[in-house]
Amino acid sequence: MRYLYLCLSVLCIILLNSCCTTKVVYCSDNRPVTYPRSQKCALKAYKQTVAGFQVNLESTIQDIIEIGSLTVGSEPKLLREQLSNESIRHQEALKASFLALSSDPCRNSERHYKLVESINKRNYDFMELQTKLENSSTAQAKETVKNYLYERGKREGQGIKKITDSLDKYYSENNNYPSDLNSLNLNDIILMLGESRLDYKKIDNQTYKLKFAGEDYALGTTDDKIYDGIQGETKRDNG
């Protein structure tokens, strides 16, 4: 993951120096967007971004296992399986985002770079886990690994609740919903969740719909968590 972060951080350099050329388009708001000139180039940029990712991920997980002296029990296997599955979801989401960027750069550029930002944040969290384990006893390390993904999921649930509670409060104070989530001043929570995983739509002054991409990191799938707000009361849409 450390190496994926480095790759993502120099994404523009990769695109500009690849054999495939890039194009620049000026969108309706005069915002310049650099994007791969074809789907083939988009796939090449994606492959360069995640080159060696699986090897580096496995090495990083092994480092964590060794740091925490996790040589017995189910924790190492569970950690490896869960984080490997997460890396696959990240790669799938990133691949789809590169392709979307190539086909419609103005529409997809903001979401693409927010996805990159979200994945970078995940990688920082992972490195913090390594640091925490370095200062843990074996017993503490086992418990840390066991609870790592559970606690992260719990934080995400709390973050979503903070957003929906803030939307309800906004309505009670203004008798309408905000046009976007930025009006709630919850930038830290949105960054933690990943803005590319959030889809908020104000339907009218009295109603809104919020979608949160779950573990697959992709909006518009069966993994979405959907919330409906009506006149200051938010309810979970359970399908």
Image (cartoon, rainbow, N blue to C red):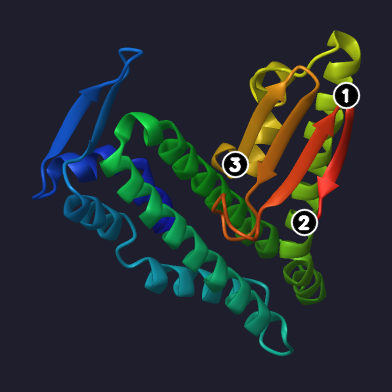
**Which residue is found at the position 71% from the left and 63% from the top?**
149
Residue 187 seen in the figure: no
Q: Is residue 72 left or right of residue 114?
A: right
Q: Is residue 158 above or below residue 239?
A: above
Q: Is residue 131 above or below residue 226?
A: below
Q: Which residue is mark 2?
A: 239
Q: State the residue in front, 76 or 103.
A: 103
Q: Which residue is mark 3?
A: 194
Q: CA distance from mark 2 to mark 1?
A: 20 Å
Q: Which residue is mark 1?
A: 231
Disc 2 to disc 3: CB gap under 8 Å: no
Q: CA distance from mark 2 to mark 3?
A: 23 Å
**Which residue is found at the position 68% from the left and 25% from the top?**
202
**Hey, which quadrant is residue 147 in on the image?**
bottom right
Q: State the residue in front, 72 or 158.
A: 158
Q: State the residue in front, 153 or 28.
A: 28
Q: Amino acid at mark 1?
A: Gln
**Mark 2 / mark 3, whichever is N-terminal:** 3
Q: Quadrant of the C terminus?
A: bottom right
Q: Is residue 138 left or right of residue 54?
A: right
Q: CA distance from mark 3 to mark 1?
A: 27 Å
Q: Position of residue 216 (x, y in %)?
A: 58, 60
**Hey, which quadrant is residue 3 in on the image?**
bottom left
What is the count of numbered marks? Answer: 3
**Mark 2 / mark 1, whichever is N-terminal:** 1
* Element type where label 2 sits in the image: loop
Q: Amino acid at mark 3?
A: Gly
**Hey, which quadrant is residue 54 in on the image?**
bottom left
Disc 3 to disc 1: CB gap under 8 Å: no
* Element type where label 3 sits in the image: loop
Q: Amino acid at mark 2?
A: Gly
Residue 139 seen in the figure: yes
